[in-house]
Image (cartoon, rainbow, N blue to C red):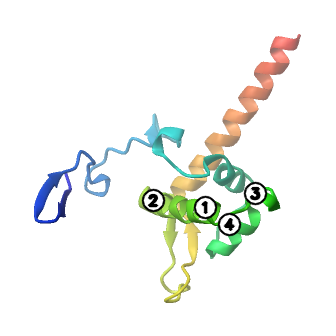
Amino acid sequence: MKFVVYREKTVISVIEDYKSTDYNPLLFAGYSTMKNSVHLPLYNEFMDIFANYEIKNWQAKHFWEKMIIGKKSRTEQHRRLMYMGLRVLVKCEYLEVDVSESTSKTFSYNETRWLDELRKNHKKQMLEKVFLKKRLNF
């Protein structure tokens, strides 16, 4: 468990340090799945990006350009949510920061093997939904 010190009070967090254990709640039966319960901001937008692009040396501006958010509804709040989402993805080890390509002002992101498995599983789930609909129609 991690301990968080705030104003000289120690608060015990229920979040385990997943790097020190083999348990990861995002992994299910050998498949990498990310559920909305992970609290990933802009979940659907990130999943669309992962399904269609390979992430190699991307900066935040690349994610922002690829997000399918209407031009009129793109606000500073959406940009903050995107940055929060990138932090969650790095923390959950779906993305990693490439230190050699990053600068003091911008980070460069690469996908990990977990993101590749997430992409494969997401495509598989989408195909299963399509086949189920077709089967129900016949």
Question: Residue 7, how many percent across, how many down?
Answer: 15, 65
Question: Residue 132, how many percent across, how many down?
Answer: 76, 20
Residue 111 shows up from this direction: yes
The numbered mark, 2 or 3, whose residue comes first in the sequence reads 3
How far apart are the alpha carbons under marks 1 and 3? 10 Å
How far apart are the alpha carbons under marks 4 and 1? 15 Å
For the point 81% across and 12% down, which residue is it? 136
Furthest toward the right, the residue is 138
In this figure, which residue is indicated by the disc labeled 1?
77
Q: Amino acid at mark 3?
A: Ser
Label 2 residue SS: loop
In this figure, which residue is indicated by the disc labeled 3?
73
Q: Nearer the viewer, mark 2 or mark 4?
A: 4
Q: Amino acid at mark 4?
A: Phe
For the point 51% across and 61% down, which residue is it? 84
Q: Residues within 10 Å of mark 4 (few under 14, many from 20)?
A: some
Q: Amino acid at mark 2?
A: Glu
For the point 87% across and 13% down, which residue is it? 137
How far apart are the alpha carbons under marks 2 and 4? 17 Å
Q: Image height check: is 101 above or below 9?
A: below
In this figure, which residue is indicated by the disc labeled 4?
63
Question: Residue 76, how many percent across, how many down?
Answer: 64, 66
Task: Looking at the picture, tell me which residue is in the foreground, 65 or 7.
Answer: 7
Q: Residues within 10 Å of mark 3 (few under 14, many from 20)?
A: few
In this figure, which residue is indicated by the disc labeled 2?
93
Q: Nearer the viewer, mark 4 or mark 1?
A: 1
The numbered mark, 2 or 1, whose residue comes first in the sequence reads 1
Q: Nearer the viewer, mark 2 or mark 1?
A: 1
How far apart are the alpha carbons under marks 2 and 1? 24 Å
Q: Is residue 92 left or right of residue 82?
A: left
